[in-house]
Amino acid sequence: MKTLVWDLPLRLFHWLLALSVSGALVTVSLGDGWMLWHERFGLAVIGLLAFRLVWGVAGSTHARFASFFPTPARVRAYLNGQWQRPGHNPLGAASVFALLGLMAFQAITGLFSGDDVAFFGPLSQLVSFDTGSLLSGWHRSTEELIYALLALHVLAIIVYRARGKKLLESMIHGQAEVPASQAEPLRGGGWRALVMALLIAGAAIWLASGSWIPAPTPAVPGW
């Protein structure tokens, strides 16, 4: 039977994150003139990830990390063909955690990145030039991993669609086909949790933007 699995805030997060990551990847390939937009997309990723962390604790049933964390018992059940629960299966859950972790790494290293040519992240003033250069190198070198994980994500969607499971559509309308014995109404994720998640996401963007850092004192002419 069809039942609601993915709540609206989670679905919006999913598509906004896809848009923000795509924007960051496209703008960084367009050259120096687009680095401001690259930074803006990166800040959006920071806010979205902060939202997801809160929603992973206070969101509705299948949005909570505890509901789909790939424990050894869950992985064994899935590999033995005994997995029937709605939401992410254990392998899909591992992919989700890998993507979120890598995107967080990319976004955070980008905040502190700096070089003497093209770009200084909004928090680069807080670290030394050498540290900023190191983080900038890490930021660039792990970009290919994002492409690889995104490709695996798309491949999984295609494979599951061939097996009759429309994952893409489920992330649009939120419903999925589940055994009647496993169907249950979503719990949690009310408006208070949503307001809290949005406030924390806004605070994360503000902190990451560096707008709270005092401007450097201008040099006195002649000194």
Image: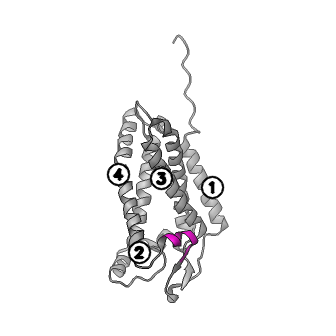
Query: Which residue is at the far top?
Result: 222
Mark 2 crowdedness (10 Å alpha carbons): few <14, some 14-19, many ≥20: few
Q: Position of residue 198 (x, y in %)?
A: 62, 57
Closest to the observer: 163 or 192? 163
The label on residue 160 is 2
Q: Amino acid at mark 4?
A: Glu
The label on residue 199 is 1
Callout 4–callout 3 Cβ contact below 8 Å? no
Q: Secondary structure at mark 2?
A: helix
- Asked if the stretch drawn in magenta spans residue 87, the answer is no
The mark lying in front, picked from 2 and 4, is: 2
Residue identified by numbered label 4? 144
**Above or below for 65 versus 34:** below
Q: For the stretch drawn in magenta, what is the main secondary structure?
A: helix
Q: Position of residue 18 (x, y in %)?
A: 50, 58
Which one is earlier in the sequence, the residue at label 4 or at label 3?
Answer: 3
Residue identified by numbered label 3? 22
- Asked if the stretch drawn in magenta spans residue 174, the answer is yes
Residue 191: which quarter of the image?
Answer: bottom right
Mark 3 crowdedness (10 Å alpha carbons): few <14, some 14-19, many ≥20: few
Spatial CA span between label 4 and label 3? 13 Å
Magenta region: 168-175
Q: Position of residue 112 (x, y in %)?
A: 45, 41
